């Protein structure tokens, strides 16, 4: 294990390159005879461990590929549409009672 892989993720600089084994599920998390994924102990000290393991498991199909998060504007638009529909419905219910 090199000095680069022993550092904490927040200390890892952007100039560091991913190792050649990055995301290679056969090297990072091979499957044993029982069909259980076995992350390698040597990989756990690497600063790229989490994203590497995620990519490897995505390649295997064991976890879903993350989808792009919706922008805040889209979420706000949906919220306002639902709120408006509820307000219109409640105001029409109030008029029907009178």
Image: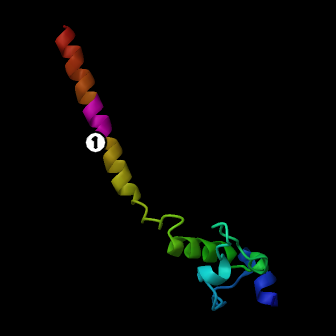
| Horizontal side, residue 64 vs residue 44: left or right | left
Please give the name of the residue rendered at 62% of the width and 82% of the height, measured from the top-left corner.
26
Nearer to us in this view, 33 or 1 = 33
Count the marks: 1
Q: Which residues are magenta?
A: 82-86
Would you identify the image quadrant in which residue 32 lies? bottom right
Q: Secondary structure at mark 1?
A: helix
Nearer to us in this view, 66 or 13 = 66
* Position of 70 relative to 26 (above/below): above
Nearer to us in this view, 12 or 40 = 40
Where residue 85 appears, as percent x and y from the top left, is: 25, 34
Q: Tell me which colouring the rendered structure shows.
A: rainbow
| Horizontal side, residue 87 vs residue 56: left or right | left
Would you identify the image quadrant in which residue 92 lies? top left
Where residue 40 appears, as percent x and y from the top left, is: 74, 77
Where residue 70 appears, as percent x and y from the top left, is: 39, 59
Please give the name of the residue rendered at 23% of the width and 29% of the height, measured from the top-left corner.
88
Where residue 9 appears, as percent x and y from the top left, is: 72, 76
**Quarter that holds the C terminus:** top left
Magenta region, main secondary structure: helix
Q: Is residue 70 magenta?
A: no
* Position of 47 relative to 81 (above/below): below
| Horizontal side, residue 9 vs residue 21: left or right | right
In the picture of the structure, the residue carrying the numbered disc 1 is: 81
Nearer to us in this view, 72 or 38 = 38
**Quarter that holds the N terminus:** bottom right
| Horizontal side, residue 14 vs residue 71: left or right | right
Would you identify the image quadrant in which residue 57 lies? bottom right
């Amino acid at each position: 294990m090199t000095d680069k892989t022993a550092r904490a993720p927040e200390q890892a600089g952007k100039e560091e390159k991913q190792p050649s084994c990055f995301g290679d599920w056969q090297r990072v998390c091979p499957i044993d005879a029982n069909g259980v994924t076995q992350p390698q102990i040597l990989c756990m000290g690497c600063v790229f461990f989490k994203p590497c393991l995620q990519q490897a498991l995505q390649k295997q199909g064991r976890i879903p590929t993350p989808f792009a998060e919706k922008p805040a504007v889209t979420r706000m638009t949906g919220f306002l549409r639902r709120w408006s529909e509820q307000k219109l419905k409640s105001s029409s219910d109030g008029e029907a009672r009178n």
